[in-house]
Image: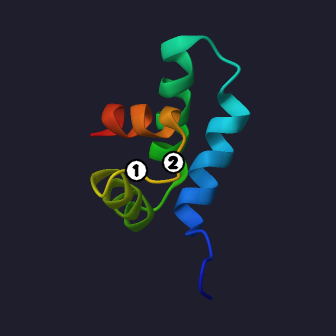
């Protein structure tokens, strides 16, 4: 499906939207914790690849969470 948002990007942004109310670093830690606990390693790898490719369309909170996960 052309133009479809990759599921990892969509889900990561949804998590960031739901946890973005937390103060500063707590939000990034909460997003990282959720992704680390519940995401399959293959999903995390694809998310890392999106960040490495420029993080186009990713919430900055997701990018911060990926830095914590690595």
In the image, farthest residue toward the top: 23
Which residue is disc 1 drawn over?
Answer: 55
Q: Dot 2, crowdedness within 10 Å: few (<14), some or many (≥20)?
A: some
Classify 6 as above or below 32: below
Number of numbered callouts drawn? 2
Tell me what residue is drawn at x 41 percent, y 31 percent.
Answer: 64
Instruction: Please tell me which residue lies in front, 1 or 44.
Output: 1
Q: Is residue 56 left or right of residue 52?
A: right
In the rendered view, does 3 fall on the left or right side of 58?
A: right
Q: How far across and down, in percent of the image, does residue 9 sit? A: 54, 58
- Tag 1: Cα neighbours inside 10 Å, few (<14), some, or many (≥20)? some
State the residue position of label 2: 58
Residue 70 badge: none
Please say if 48 is above or below 68: below
Question: Quick check: marks 2 and 1 in contact, CB under 8 Å?
Answer: yes
Mark 2 element type: loop
Q: Is residue 54 left or right of residue 61?
A: left
Q: Position of residue 17 (x, y in %)?
A: 69, 37
Q: Residue 29: horizontal and vertical position, in percent?
A: 48, 25
Q: Quadrant of the C terminus?
A: top left
Q: What's the residue at 62%, 88% (across, down)?
A: 1
Q: Check the image and report above or below for 3 versus 54.
A: below
Instruction: Indicate the quadrant where residue 69 lies.
Output: top left
Residue 7, horizontal then vertical, whole percent: 59, 67
């Amino acid at each position: 499906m052309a133009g479809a948002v990759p599921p990892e990007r969509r889900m990561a942004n949804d998590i960031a939207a739901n946890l973005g109310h937390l103060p500063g670093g707590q939000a990034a830690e909460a997003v990282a914790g959720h992704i680390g606990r519940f995401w399959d390693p293959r999903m995390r790898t694809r998310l890392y690849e999106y960040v490495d490719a420029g993080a186009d369309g990713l919430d900055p909170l997701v990018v911060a969470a990926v830095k914590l996960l690595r």
